Image (cartoon, coloured by chain):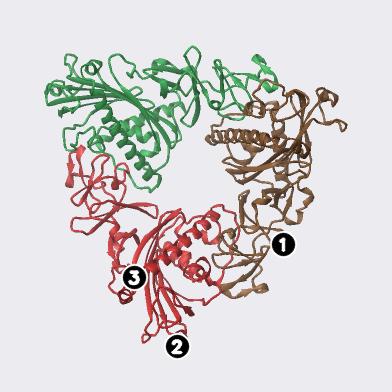
Chain colours: A green, B brown, C red
């Protein structure tokens, strides 16, 4: 994956056998025809009359007209260029100008249907071999629909290759600088330790304890300083699920700076789900949620707004940073890149992606 | 011509020995220097003092400055970069900073002159070998200047390769869908038959009878339903000339669904001239007119406005459709394309274009 | 350099061992981080606390983040992606997330520093081998900071390759046409002679006498007509320094139409410094100043405004011309180009540039 190597070349390869986040569930509404390019492939997603989702190539098999410019007829989609009608499986079931319908329509009149699922408030699309579309492979995150958390959600579009965004999200080192005035509370020189980075079957796990993390303004807490625990998995193709908790000082040491002990209870805790979807080689969509435990929200109805304001500032900081980085990468200066400890996450995750791409090739 | 084949590649080849529509006659006015790229070549067109047209490369032979940024001096054009002056034949007749004029100017100081003609209210430019520029090859259409018709005229610029527009215009199948709410009067499921498609020396001829076509709101007619007759030639490089008439029910059968019998008189009739001009590989200009017989206009001064409103809605429907199609083609997904009966026109016309290109090669 | 040859291809090669104008001195202020691409390389320039300049690649050695998005810490720059800190020599002196600083930072943690100098009110950057950065090679122009002249200054960005702008500036022939209504005072057919063009070690020298040049409206002068003397050097990579004087009629002949005799005193005189900097292959920045002798300004406080209004009109005429030319060049029509006497300057200067590029290769 050459972007990391500084060659300025975009990776032409995407993992196909993976669930990509295509939308927040409410973005695919009852009436609409939702369209998004995923890894350069146009995808149509819509809700059937029973509320279930259908997904297929947004590209008529006849002359490549986007089907999302067509109309719904019950659960079917009619292309409004020449009237070809497709069922939810992408099978053309009517060519009206030829007076063909049903099984009389030749078998090659079909567009790829994509396995699609709703889980954790996201719409997931499987871009590879449908036979291998195992819903058990959907990352086990928690979304805004989870009863234990109270989350807000949103998305941002990037003028950048998704690998640069993955790099950003698998690296905690940038928080002290890119997010100095948001997540880092104004303190670049503060309490940030190196995380533990661990390889998983479909991604990586990152865990970090920060000692002496100050209570945020929006938090009601017992103490002024905490041991802040962050742990997240980042899974193929680019899905982040992170738990954060503020624990009594001393907890980090008590846990040997590793996984939090089950008997320890955080003073406050939050969860964030995030996903990076490559639209084209040069554009990406970044989905995100964040919020506290439901019980904290019920005690303090200001907390979510405080967190959300902070998150939106920080996510915009990332967007400005990464798009500026992409502009320099585009100049293709040929300058080398050096590595720092913080790259362990990005490098390890890129290797995981590479191995998935290689295996599919 | 690979666009049809779904390879997403643009044809690098254009027919040269053909008359291209460059403008409506009134778009080249007495004073102006009209500029348009035709098949990637910049063309300057202007009116001489006697009102006749001159056309040449819009690209000074010295440093490729567009001559359309220059000024007129009588019938000549002076480039305003270094003052080179060209006569109507593209011959440089003065290099003022070298004090050269007339025959003293070296012979290679010349830009290609293009044969140009005004016919049917259009300005036509011949982009190939001037020796072969036979005005008899100008498509024998009728324009707004024809005394028997009362037409409005206009043009639209497309962000699309012209082949996709040609495809659209040589296919009547899309009318029931793309134009469901305009030309098709809200009825996709209605009265549309397959046309007869016939090869001509320089294009194709398409003829169709639709039975039970309803009278339009802007028409004063005797009956509520007619047999609607449409016939048009579509000629190289992309010129459409179409006659439409509403005939007494039963006429289609009486004509064996073929050419209208000379003894039959339509209740109402209209004519449209249309032309597609490739500007660059990625952009095209679409010229169009439409209107009823002069006698109908004289009886009903609302009819032209009714038709024109309808046409503008329909032509915008095509533009939206084709530009959306082009965006998908640009993704180069490699998806195959299937053919339907309605493709007979597009396929036959692309073959004609291919044969012209091959012959010139 | 193919642009001149009409092949429509951009030169991929730039002279490296040369001083490029990066900014007017006041454009790099005390607090800011100034960024400009020079010959496709991003460059950061800023002022140290002592007011001296520092320049380095605007591209962090870690992940190519532009350092100009970072912050200043004293004389150092901290990248705000991961906090790497660089001294004024481009040496990384701190990797905070790795707790590395000073000599513990590996030697390859470095970005190229560029030799930078302030001279003649311009910031100059040397893009090649720092060992060869001899400030004696900075063109010996006079800028707005010179006590003998009273100049205004500005810049324009072009959507054009810099070679087309160099061509324009090394050719006096276009003045009578492109600038007919500005510099040429409405008279294309007037008093313009061919200049003498002479090769220099690092560029060319152009000298021209125009006889019967009329006094401009903003000039207070003794006579209505003068012998106008213009002489300028145009040096690698694209720096113009021009002296103009209005001398008593007959002076041209008295100087044999060559260099002005030292005993001759102009009635009015002006100086202009101009520089063309390639930003990318397709974009350039054009810096310019112009003004009269300080003594003339002191006698006539309207003269600078008159000159500046004229210059801005003329420089915009050039921009419109050259960007139009570039659009035609981009069409890559393959049309040949012919040469005229006025090309002596452009051709000679392109040869100088070519020889510098070849020597470095």
Q: Is residue A21 left or right of residue B28?
A: left
The residue identified by callout 3 is C141
- The chain letter under disc 3 is C
| Residue B262 x, y percent position in the rendering | 87, 33
Asked where in the image residue A289 lies, by quadrant, the reply is top left
The 10 Å Cα crowd at callout 3, few under 14, some 14 to 19, many 20 or more, is some
The residue identified by callout 1 is B50
Mark nearest the camera among 3 and 1 is 1
Q: Is residue A230 left or right of residue B21?
A: left
Mark on residue C254?
2
The 10 Å Cα crowd at callout 1, few under 14, some 14 to 19, many 20 or more, is few
Relative to A228, say whether C52 is above or below: below
Camera-side residue: B257 or C261? B257
- The chain letter under disc 2 is C
Q: Is residue A289 left or right of residue B360?
A: left
Asked where in the image residue C222 lies, by quadrant, the reply is bottom left
Alpha carbon of mark 3 to alpha carbon of mark 1: how far?
54 Å
Instruction: For the residues labelled 2 and 3, say whether their Cβ atoms are less than 8 Å apart.
Output: no
Instruction: For the residues labelled 2 and 1, say whether their Cβ atoms are less than 8 Å apart.
Output: no
- Which is more N-terminal, label 3 or label 2? 3
| Residue C69 x, y percent position in the rendering | 29, 45
Q: Secondary structure at mark 2?
A: helix
Alpha carbon of mark 2 to alpha carbon of mark 3: how far?
27 Å
Q: Secondary structure at mark 3?
A: loop
Which residue is pictured at 36% across the width and 45% down the height? A328
Instruction: For the residues labelled 3 and 1, say whether their Cβ atoms are less than 8 Å apart.
Output: no
């Amino acid at each position: 994956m050459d972007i990391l190597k500084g060659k300025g070349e975009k990776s032409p390869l995407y993992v196909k056998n993976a669930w990509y986040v295509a939308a927040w569930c409410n973005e695919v509404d009852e009436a609409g025809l939702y369209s998004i390019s995923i890894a350069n492939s146009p995808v149509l997603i819509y809700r059937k009359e029973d509320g279930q989702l259908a997904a297929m190539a947004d590209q008529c098999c006849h002359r490549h007209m986007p089907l999302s410019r067509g109309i719904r007829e019950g659960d079917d989609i009619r292309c409004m260029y020449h009237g070809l009608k497709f069922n939810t499986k992408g099978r053309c079931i009517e060519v009206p100008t030829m007076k063909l319908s049903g099984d009389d329509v030749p078998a090659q009149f079909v567009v790829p249907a994509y396995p699609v699922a709703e889980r954790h408030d996201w719409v997931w699309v499987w871009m590879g071999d449908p036979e291998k579309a195992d819903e058990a492979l959907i990352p086990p995150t928690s979304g805004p629909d989870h009863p234990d958390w109270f989350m807000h959600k949103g998305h941002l579009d990037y003028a950048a290759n998704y690998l640069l965004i993955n790099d950003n999200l698998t690296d905690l080192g940038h928080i002290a600088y890119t997010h100095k005035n948001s997540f880092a509370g104004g303190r670049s020189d503060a309490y940030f330790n190196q995380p533990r980075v661990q390889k998983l079957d479909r991604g990586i796990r990152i865990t970090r304890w920060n000692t002496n993390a100050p209570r945020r303004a929006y938090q009601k807490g017992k103490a002024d300083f905490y041991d802040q625990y962050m742990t997240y998995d980042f899974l193929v193709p680019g899905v982040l699920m992170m738990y954060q908790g503020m624990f009594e000082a001393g907890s980090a040491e008590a846990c040997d700076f590793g996984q939090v002990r089950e008997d320890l209870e955080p003073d406050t805790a939050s969860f964030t789900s995030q996903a990076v979807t490559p639209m084209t080689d040069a554009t990406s969509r970044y989905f995100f949620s964040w919020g506290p435990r439901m019980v904290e929200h019920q005690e303090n109805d200001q907390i979510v707004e405080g967190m959300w304001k902070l998150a939106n500032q920080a996510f915009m900081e990332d967007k400005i940073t990464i798009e500026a980085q992409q502009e320099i990468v585009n100049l293709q200066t040929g300058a080398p890149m050096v590595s720092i400890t913080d790259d362990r996450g990005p490098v390890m995750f890129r290797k995981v992606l590479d191995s998935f791409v290689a295996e599919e090739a």
